[in-house]
């Protein structure tokens, strides 16, 4: 399943974490710490990517990922252009491949792409001479989200190896879950996936790729022993699709409610990639608890993306 898009000596693309070694992930986390130091300065900018052109190519909505790539590129002194499918020649029928060729002709060095179709970044990589970073494609992957999650966990808990991480909710449709599975297992963490059977699928779907992963449909049992709980956004259309009896029932069985928050204790990290449905998969109390690191995840996203841009353009 691992599709190698990297070169051994120098990585060209970042499309998923499946082809990142533990050593490379650790190097990126270390570079992220240096980038955080840059961002703590009064002048939050270094000349590392001066003269490079980065294009943010977003075919799907985004707040965190798009803005943090923009801030990251600016902090490295790159030129950054934001391209949205809406308002572009895509609306006149221009294909993804022709759009990428056009951006290349305009001088793009790095393309950051978000697309609703799984695999779109691989297609772009085949037609673009520079570097491609996946900012989220369909259900497939969201590698920079996983990297910022790994960084946040490691920064807070001082390790990744042997931690027990619970990924909770709509796992089957989640690109965040898939990229985190690659990253967490490669770094030696133990992962449990928890949610209703309709949003997890058969256990062997996961264990065929990640044999060490466990699957649970009982949240209260799965919370015992967890060091990190990563709640995922419930896409409300799942109820219309008949995958859930009701949102209230979902929250009762799989929500991070105030009662569960009280039970898990103050040392367990509460994470969420955002955007959140407060009151559904996570209560406002859990989202703002002292052990919730949801805003730290967002903050760390800028430094992680700086580290990755630096590595690809370096
Ligand atoms: N976590 C995440 O990808 O958020 P956005 O959709 O706001 O970029």
Image (tube, helix red, strand yellow):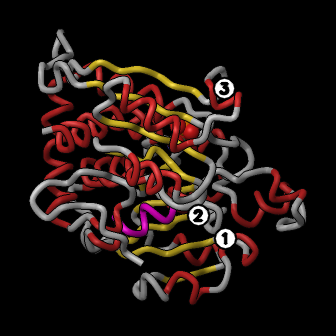
How many C-alpha atoms fall within 10 Å of the one at disc 2: few (<14), some, or many (≥20)?
many
Which residue shows up at 59% across the image and 64% down it?
A: 168
- Disc on res. 195: 1
Front residue of 74/123: it is 123
Per the image, label 3 sits on a secondary structure element best described as loop
How many C-alpha atoms fall within 10 Å of the one at disc 1: few (<14), some, or many (≥20)?
many
Q: Is residue 288 visible?
A: no
Q: Earlier in the sequence, mark 1 or mark 2?
A: 2
- Tag 1–tag 3 contact (CB < 8 Å): no
Q: Which residues are magenta?
A: 177-184
Residue 302 at x, y = what percent?
A: 33, 32
Query: Is the CB of mark 2 within 8 Å of ligand 1?
Result: no
Residue 133 at x, y = what percent?
A: 37, 45
Structural distance between the alpha carbons of marks 1 and 2: 6 Å
- Tag 2–tag 3 contact (CB < 8 Å): no
Q: Quadrant of the N terminus?
A: bottom left
Q: Earlier in the sequence, mark 2 or mark 3?
A: 3
Residue 295 at x, y = what percent?
A: 45, 34
Marks 2, 3: nearer the viewer: 3
Q: Is residue 70 toward the left or the right of residue 207 in the image? A: left
- Tag 1–tag 2 contact (CB < 8 Å): yes
Which residue shows up at 17% across the image and 10% down it?
A: 43
- Disc on res. 168: 2
Residue 118 at x, y = what percent?
A: 57, 58
Which residue shows up at 29% across the image and 44% down it?
A: 129
Structural distance between the alpha carbons of marks 2 and 3: 33 Å
- Disc on res. 86: 3
Image height check: is 1 above or below 296?
Answer: below
How many C-alpha atoms fall within 10 Å of the one at disc 3: few (<14), some, or many (≥20)?
few
């Amino acid at each position: 399943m691992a599709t190698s898009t990297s070169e051994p000596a120098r990585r060209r693309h970042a499309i998923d974490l499946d082809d990142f070694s533990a050593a490379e992930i650790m190097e990126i986390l270390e570079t992220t710490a240096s980038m955080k130091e840059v961002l703590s300065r009064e002048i939050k900018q270094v000349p590392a990517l001066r003269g490079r052109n980065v294009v943010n190519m977003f075919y799907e909505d985004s707040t965190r990922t798009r803005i943090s790539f923009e801030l990251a590129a600016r902090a490295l002194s790159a030129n950054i252009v934001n391209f949205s499918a809406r308002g572009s020649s895509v609306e006149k029928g221009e294909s993804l491949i022709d759009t990428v060729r056009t951006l290349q002709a305009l001088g793009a060095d790095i393309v950051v792409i978000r697309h609703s179709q799984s695999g779109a970044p691989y297609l772009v990589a085949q037609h673009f001479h520079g570097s491609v970073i996946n900012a989220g494609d369909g259900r497939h992957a969201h590698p920079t989200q996983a990297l910022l999650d790994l960084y946040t966990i490691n920064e807070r808990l001082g390790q990744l190896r042997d931690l027990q991480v619970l990924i909770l909710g709509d796992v089957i449709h989640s690109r965040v879950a898939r990229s985190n599975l690659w990253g967490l297992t490669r770094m030696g963490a133990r992962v449990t996936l928890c949610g209703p059977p309709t949003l997890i699928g058969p256990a062997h779907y996961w264990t065929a790729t990640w044999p060490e992963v466990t699957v649970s449909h009982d949240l209260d049992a799965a919370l015992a022993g967890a060091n990190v709980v990563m709640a995922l956004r419930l896409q409300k259309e799942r109820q219309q699709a008949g995958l859930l009896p009701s949102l209230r029932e979902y929250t009762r069985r799989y929500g991070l409610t105030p009662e569960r928050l009280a039970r898990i204790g103050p040392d367990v990290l509460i994470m969420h990639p955002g955007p959140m449905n407060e009151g559904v998969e996570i209560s406002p109390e859990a989202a703002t608890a002292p052990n919730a690191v949801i805003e730290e995840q967002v903050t760390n996203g800028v430094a992680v993306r700086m580290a990755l841009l630096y590595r690809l353009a370096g």
